[in-house]
Image: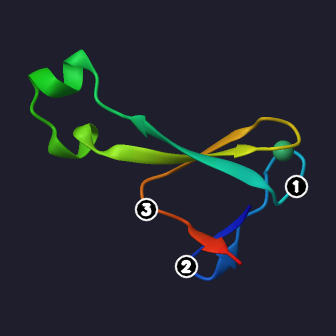
């Protein structure tokens, strides 16, 4: 799947591939919970490059390009 964010096509910074698998990762840690940082409890969106496995992290959900 290809993705874009703010109308910009996302390409892998490592190999320039434009096909990714999307997944989600929790950002919270014990330290973040202790200090009650709400933003740190959000899920980040990750795009894993299908070619080289480089992971790009996003706080906003990238749109799928159909
Ligand atoms: Zn790549």
Q: Quadrant of the N terminus?
A: bottom right
Instruction: Residue at 62% x, 83% y: name it.
Output: 7
Does the CB distance between marks 2 and 1 fall below 8 Å?
Answer: no
Mark pair 3, 2: CA separation: 10 Å
> Is 5 on the left-hand or right-hand side of 50?
left
Q: Where is residue 19 in the image (x, y as percent from the top left)?
A: 80, 56
Instruction: Residue at 78% x, 61% y: name it.
Output: 11
Circle 1 sits in a helix, a strand or a loop, which is it? loop
Q: Does the residue labelled 3 lie within 8 Å of ligand 1?
A: no
Instruction: Residue at 88% x, 55% y: name it.
Output: 17
Residue, far front: 66
Between residue 64 and residue 52, name the one nearer to us.
64
Instruction: Residue at 54% x, 65% y: name it.
Output: 62
Does label 1 or label 3 sit earlier along the sequence? Answer: 1
Q: How many labels does the image show?
A: 3
Give the vertical position of 27 relative to 19 (above or below).
Answer: above
Please rate how many residues cluster around mark 2, counting C-alpha atoms within 10 Å: few if below 14, some from 14 to 19, many from 20.
few
Please rate how many residues cluster around mark 3, counting C-alpha atoms within 10 Å: few if below 14, some from 14 to 19, many from 20.
few
* Residue indicated by mark 2: 6
Circle 2 sits in a helix, a strand or a loop, which is it? loop
Does label 2 or label 1 sit earlier along the sequence? Answer: 2
Mark pair 2, 1: CA separation: 19 Å
Q: Position of residue 3 (x, y in %)?
A: 67, 67
Q: In which quarter of the image is the C terminus?
A: bottom right
Q: In which quarter of the image is residue 5?
A: bottom right
Give the vertical position of 64 relative to 48 (above or below).
Answer: below
Q: Residue 60 carries which label?
A: 3
Give the vertical position of 43 relative to 6 (above or below).
Answer: above
Q: Does the residue labelled 1 lie within 8 Å of ligand 1?
A: yes
* Residue indicated by mark 1: 17
């Amino acid at each position: 799947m290809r993705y874009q964010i703010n109308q910009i096509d996302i390409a892998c910074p490592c190999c320039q591939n434009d096909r990714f698998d999307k997944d989600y990762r929790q950002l919270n840690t014990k330290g973040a919970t202790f200090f009650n940082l709400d933003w740190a409890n959000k899920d980040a969106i990750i795009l894993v490059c299908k070619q080289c496995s480089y992971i790009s992290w996003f706080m906003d959900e990238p749109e799928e390009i159909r």
